[in-house]
Amino acid sequence: MLVSDFDYDLPPESIAQEPLADRAGSRLLQLIRQPGSWHERAFRDFPNLLRPDDLLVVNNTRVFPARLYGYRSGGRAQPLSRRNPAARELLRGRIEVLLTRQVADVLSSNPEEWECLVRPGRKIGVGEKLYFDNPSGSAGDAAELEAEVIGRGSSGERRIRFSPVPDFFARVQRIGHVPLPPYIDRDDRRTDRERYQTVYAQTREGMARSVAAPTAGLHFTPEILRQIRERGIEIAEITLHVGLGTFQPVRVENVEDHKLHRESYEISAAAAQAIKRAKAERRRVVAVGTTTVRTLEYAVGLMERKSGANSIEAGRGEADLFIYPGYRFRVVDALLTNFHLPQSTLLMLVCALGGKELVMEAYRHAVEAGFRFFSYGDCMFIE
């Protein structure tokens, strides 16, 4: 299967650069697999599109300001040409780091280790020191955080180790920036800290570890959730901390050759019981977002490999399931999702559930009908 099979034309003006003032004011494209049709609706219709016995599963992770700006020491950088007069400034210049996955336990007393993307990164080698929030412009002076590059990944990512501080996440919250996706062509603002967050995101310590929002959940408001519950529809919460897999482009020609990065997840005992009960009673499991789909399908696959049981158990781990057409879904029956980038793994997942030809045709219709695309855009309900 070719990656190019999942391409489509999208004019730049279709990419939403700003969120709507009203979270629930988005448009919704209802995609019905049988008989293969779609209907234009509003997201406010969503509670009535659900069945009274549905189980709605959401991802309650919290986004943290994972984009850090700082300076590099230049001590271990690869040498630049002496003929370049800007060499000194480049070696000690500004850098941008996007933290994508925490390696050490969030409650560990050990130094914080993270996988990250660095820009500009080509000249930054192992052993390089990085300093963050340095208002004086002199590397190492009054830095809120200090880190060392301790490894390189096969796709250009780095592993860095922060020097121990007693309030690491508090400092990141203070100096970090909201990691808006690269297709949003503007700097983040203070308002993005609230708007690029679901209303049901958990607030307890350790939950703010996602570097991207589970964007299908951005449409929900307390009023929409109240309407859903008033219809008797059960809601379960799971957690998947969104990491590098969301940003990772597909660089291979054949879909089957691509590998996803691992992302941390947790399924509570209450959520596992609710999902098992729904499947036993032949009720629909409706996932909010592709992150929820990947978590649930990975968890059931894990149980199949361990015990042969087609079931979900409570637990935590790291998911790396890549879903594309041909995959047999074991848990998820319907999906609420935003519109995704061409040739992306998220679009491939949507095609796996909705049917490739139908989904790609619906995408072309959405472009022509003026739907807003990507994180701050409109949504699609596949059932």
Image (spheres, rainbow, N blue to C red):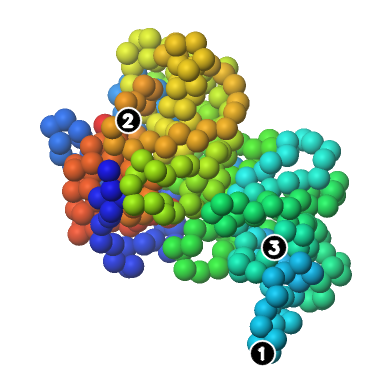
Residue 25, position as x, y percentages in the image: 36, 50
Residue position marked by numbered label 2 in the rendering = 327
Cα gap from disc 1 to disc 2, whole angstroms: 54 Å
Residue 232 occupies quadrant: top left
Which is more N-terminal, label 3 or label 1? 1
Q: Image height check: is 229 above or below 40?
A: above
Kindly identify the residue that appears in the image at 53 percent across and 42 percent down: 261
Residue 141, position as x, y percentages in the image: 86, 70
- Residue 318 placement, left or right of 7: right
Residue 377, position as x, y percentages in the image: 38, 54
Viewport quadrant of the C terminus: top left
- Residue 311 placement, left or right of 28: right
Type of amino acid under label 3: Gly
Kindly identify the residue that appears in the image at 23 percent across and 37 percent down: 355
CB under 8 Å between discs 3 and 2: no
Cα gap from disc 1 to disc 3, whole angstroms: 21 Å
Give the SS element for disc 2.
loop
Q: Nearer the viewer, mark 1 or mark 2?
A: 1
Residue 175 occupies quadrant: bottom right
Q: Residues within 10 Å of mark 3 (few under 14, many from 20)?
A: some
Numbered badge on residue 83: 1
Kindly identify the residue that appears in the image at 59 percent across and 35 percent down: 264
Q: Image height check: is 310 above or below 103?
A: above
| Depth order, front residue of 277/47 | 277
Residue position marked by numbered label 3 in the rendering = 125
Q: Residues within 10 Å of mark 2 (few under 14, many from 20)?
A: few
Residue 376 occupies quadrant: bottom left
Number of dots carrying numbers: 3
| Depth order, front residue of 155/343 | 155
